[in-house]
């Protein structure tokens, strides 16, 4: 489960942590904050994928519907910046990593300054914090979990072990060389003996040091704290710089430790650096994994917009989502993918639109898209003298059907595109039920359930009671709340008083919590008034 919370953003002074599953429906009254949640999610994901973690851009979103242009439009209007602070912050969990972002700016600025960007490995409880304005980076872990990790901190220092083995090897070679010198009074013999004595002393020191570190390490490392200055703001370059800095610093401190014993703060610093060195593979893997998680996380925002109805759809019109969906399908050559074609045709029939889709690309700039409404049988063809299946331009369909064709194609491209690979894709849909009658609104739930099985995450803002009720039926019929089954559905209710809660399902599909007034109870209230 992923989760999101934030402060001082748009409608909410404080938005408490909400978990959302593979299929999440955001339900509530108009202006209750559903769009605020979506915009926060899109903005923080776009920031994490950016190549500069020192600034936050309010006018660089994939969708114009998310853009705020200035900091003042994003800041909650009821926030007293003098008392509560002039900042907006977000906390976003993806898998085992929790990201924290804190920003500030002047009211009319489009670009905000990042005060802090942190990530926590929730399994190991390590926190990595970057403060861009101070050009400062911190690694810390003061959890009880860290204190309880006996084995990790009682491992001998690998660098000391390597040096010990190297010293023993050199001493063996020296002794062999000494045995070949016949004149014990020669300068060569004296020099070899002197080197041999130094190596023997070093080996003795290393053995004592290793034994001491194994006994004392546990007490020294009650917590971990490492800090360093930085010059990078690109996340990949930043992580690389951090690893290089701490390893270089350890090399320096290790060399010093061979000459004198550290005490006080220097001893504490050396213990922390030694821990980083011993566990450098873990830290390197965390940085790599975080970058991979961010790179593989893709969110697609599909706003509810009326489509211009053209017979020839302009491929270059980026504002026309229908044209873009059809063109993306065509250029990906998905009409040659049998599974993709079967998926589209099945959905067209389920939603009573037609039997198949045919697309012709005209000179690479326009698309002609038609729906095959039925294929005549031999008897029908003879009786009506029909030789070709009946077709209709998509632009001549009703608004609801156009909306559905666009959505089906967009989902098909995401599912079957060769570029999908292992990407974690989230599709955020605004009012998918727009212009649909109740039966088809209900069928949307079946579509989303099927799409989720392809690894696509769905977040939908909706006012459809039929869509939400269908989730309850699926949960009951498929026993999704009975182990070992996993329930992909979550319904999050936004109340008018800025309170938000997860409805939570029971095993029989019913909700554990109650909706606010005006949603599930509206039909019942009307019926009561009619009686």
Image (cartoon, grey):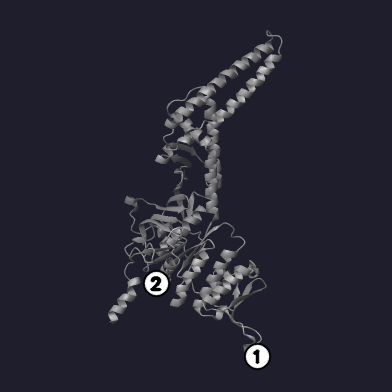
Measure the C-alpha gap from mark 1 to mark 2. 46 Å
Say what secondary structure mark 2 lies in.
helix
Image position of 293 with respect to 191: above or below: below
Foreground label between 1 and 2: 1
Q: Residue at x 60, y 26 (%)?
A: 165
- Residue indicated by mark 1: 382
- Residue indicated by mark 2: 465
Q: Residue at x 60, y 76 (%)?
A: 357
> Around disc 1, counting alpha carbons within 10 Å, would you say few (fewer than 14), some (14 to 19), or many (20 or more)?
few
Q: Point out residue 248 in the picture as x, y percentages from the top left corner.
A: 55, 34
Say what secondary structure mark 1 lies in.
helix
Residue toward you, 183 or 14 = 183
Residue toward you, 315 or 24 = 24
Image position of 240 with respect to 41: above or below: above
Task: Answer yes or no: is residue 327 visible.
Answer: no
Residue toward you, 309 or 456 = 456
């Amino acid at each position: 489960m992923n989760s999101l919370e934030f402060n001082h953003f748009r409608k909410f002074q404080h938005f408490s942590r909400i978990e959302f599953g593979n299929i999440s429906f955001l339900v509530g009254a108009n202006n209750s904050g559903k769009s605020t949640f979506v915009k926060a999610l899109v903005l923080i994901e776009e920031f994490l994928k950016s190549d500069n973690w020192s600034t936050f851009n309010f006018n660089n979103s994939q969708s114009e519907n998310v853009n705020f242009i200035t900091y003042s439009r994003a800041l909650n209007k009821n926030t007293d910046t003098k008392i509560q602070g002039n900042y907006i912050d977000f906390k976003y969990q993806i898998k085992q990593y929790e990201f924290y972002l804190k920003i500030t700016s002047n009211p009319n600025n489009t670009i905000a300054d990042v005060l802090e960007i942190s990530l926590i490995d929730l399994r190991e409880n390590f926190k990595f914090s970057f403060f861009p304005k101070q050009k400062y980076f911190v690694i810390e872990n003061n959890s009880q979990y860290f204190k309880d990790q006996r084995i990790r901190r009682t491992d001998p220092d690998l660098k000391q072990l390597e040096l010990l083995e190297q010293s023993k090897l050199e001493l063996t070679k020296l002794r062999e060389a000494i045995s070949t010198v016949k004149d014990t009074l020669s300068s060569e013999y004296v020099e070899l003996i002197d080197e041999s004595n130094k190596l023997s002393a070093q080996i003795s020191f290393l053995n004592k040091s290793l034994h001491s570190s194994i006994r004392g390490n546990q007490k020294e490392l009650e917590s971990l704290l490492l800090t360093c200055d930085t010059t990078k703001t690109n996340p990949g370059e930043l992580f690389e710089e951090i690893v290089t800095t701490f390893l270089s610093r350890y090399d320096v401190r290790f060399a010093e430790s061979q000459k004198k014993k550290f005490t006080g703060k220097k001893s504490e610093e050396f213990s922390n650096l030694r821990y980083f060195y011993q566990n450098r593979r873990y830290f390197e893997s965390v940085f790599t994994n975080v970058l991979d998680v961010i790179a593989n996380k893709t969110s697609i925002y599909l706003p509810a917009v009326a489509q211009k109805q053209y017979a020839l759809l302009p491929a270059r019109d980026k504002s026309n989502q229908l044209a873009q969906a059809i063109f993306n399908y065509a250029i990906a050559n998905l009409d040659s993918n049998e599974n993709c074609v079967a998926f589209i045709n099945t959905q067209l029939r389920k939603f009573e639109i037609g039997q198949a889709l045919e697309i012709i690309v005209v000179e690479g700039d326009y698309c002609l898209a038609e729906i095959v409404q039925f294929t005549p049988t031999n008897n029908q063809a003879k009786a009506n003298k029909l030789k070709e299946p009946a077709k209709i331009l998509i632009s001549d369909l009703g608004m609801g059907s156009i909306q559905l064709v666009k959505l089906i194609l967009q989902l098909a491209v995401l599912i079957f595109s060769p570029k999908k690979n292992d990407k974690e894709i989230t599709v955020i849909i605004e009012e998918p039920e727009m212009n649909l009658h109740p039966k088809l609104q209900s069928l949307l739930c079946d579509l989303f359930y099927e799409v989720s099985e392809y690894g696509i995450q769905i977040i939908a803002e909706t006012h459809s009671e039929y869509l939400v009720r269908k989730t309850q039926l699926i949960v009951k019929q498929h026993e999704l709340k009975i182990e070992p089954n996993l329930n992909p559905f979550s319904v999050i209710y936004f109340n008018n008083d800025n309170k938000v809660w997860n409805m939570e399902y029971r095993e029989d599909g019913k909700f554990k919590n109650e909706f606010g007034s005006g949603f599930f109870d509206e039909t019942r209230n009307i019926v009561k008034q009619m009686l």
